[in-house]
Image (cartoon, grey):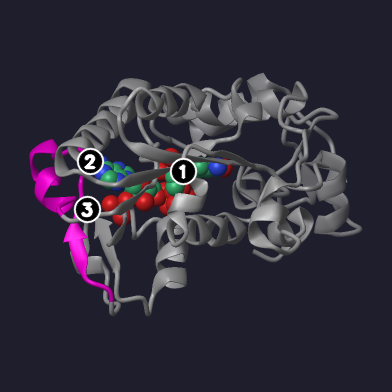
Amino acid sequence: MILVTGATGALGALVSERLSGRDDVVLGTRAPERLRGTSPVRRIDFDAPDTLAEGFAGVDVLLLISAGYGEDDTVIARHEAAIAAAEKAGVGHVVYTSLTADGDHLPYALPHRWTERRLRDSALTWTILRNGLYAELLALLTAPSPDGTVTAPLGDGRAAVVARADLADAAALVVTDAPAHAGRVHELVGEHAVGGADLARAYGAHVRYEPGTLAEARAGITALGVEAFQVPMLVGTYSAIAAGFLGRTGGELRALLGRAPRPAIEAITSP
Ligand SMILES: NC(=O)c1ccc[n+]([C@@H]2O[C@H](COP(=O)([O-])OP(=O)(O)OC[C@H]3O[C@@H](n4cnc5c(N)ncnc54)[C@H](OP(=O)(O)O)[C@@H]3O)[C@@H](O)[C@H]2O)c1
């Protein structure tokens, strides 16, 4: 049996779609009432560790979708609960959606690296999918202002972003052929890196790229009233791209998918 956690999230829903029709798939979510497909659904909430033994019973392959919104200690506690429960329930293989190694300077890298280490140190069979930054996230972070200016502080930096749908395809392929990926770490970054000037061109002839400063971005994000932990996450994403840490491209996604990934610019401008 394959269990997908986080099945109502953006990535989890896409993976669930790809696995629908299989009779060995169970979807896990905090909110089972939100799922109305053909696959059976279980309540899976890493914040309720006592319920996870039952939730993971009989699972051969667990797709552990990171539950990454929160302070590091919150996210680590969630992932610890999930992995400890997988150990206790005798789960055969855990596939974890991590973050590209090139993202090590991102503020949210730490819980991913912690979780990878926790899996490596366990007796579980594991596969780590080091997902690149979502193209859809970069789209949100670089949306032009109403007067047609991209002010995202990316400097001359570029990011090898990936369409979330391609990462869902990759995850679905891996969980349905898990033994072939045992003990492997897949670096799933894009084949082309895009920066602020590329994005402005793609958004339209009237759009200009006039990057602001990180301080301006921080003030703008804070003014939106987002949760406190999200401010450094978002500002740190700009900073890591601007400093050139997310521009490295790779071909592993193509090799895994057996086809070209969706071009990043297309995923950004036509999500
Ligand atoms: N590579 C990137 O650029 C990037 C960008 C943003 C986030 N991420 C990471 O990738 C994950 C999936 O991305 P997404 O776009 O699908 O995010 P999303 O749409 O915001 O979904 C959040 C996910 O976290 C799960 N979750 C939250 N709290 C949980 C808990 N207590 N127990 C179990 N699951 C919990 C949700 O599951 P349910 O609501 O179904 O229970 C849902 O699948 C994120 O959670 C984050 O860790 C990656």
The picture quadrant where one finds residue 31 is bottom left
Residue 239 position within the rendered picture, expressed as x and y whole percent measured from the top left:
67, 23
Q: Residues within 10 Å of mark 2 (few under 14, many from 20)?
A: many
Disc 1 and disc 2 in contact, CB within 8 angstroms: no
* Residue 228 visible in image: no
**Quadrant of the image containing the N terminus:** bottom left
Nearer mark to the viewer, of 1 and 2: 1
State the SS at label 2. Answer: helix
State the SS at label 3. Answer: loop
Kind of residue indicated by mark 3: Arg
Provide the residue designation for mark 3: 30
In the visual, does 45 lie left or right of 223? left
Front-most of 71 and 226?
71
Nearer mark to the viewer, of 2 and 3: 2
Disc 3 beta carbon < 8 A from ligand 1?
Answer: yes
Residues shaded magenta: 39-57
Provide the residue designation for mark 1: 182
Number of numbered labels in the structure image: 3
Q: Is residue 42 magenta?
A: yes
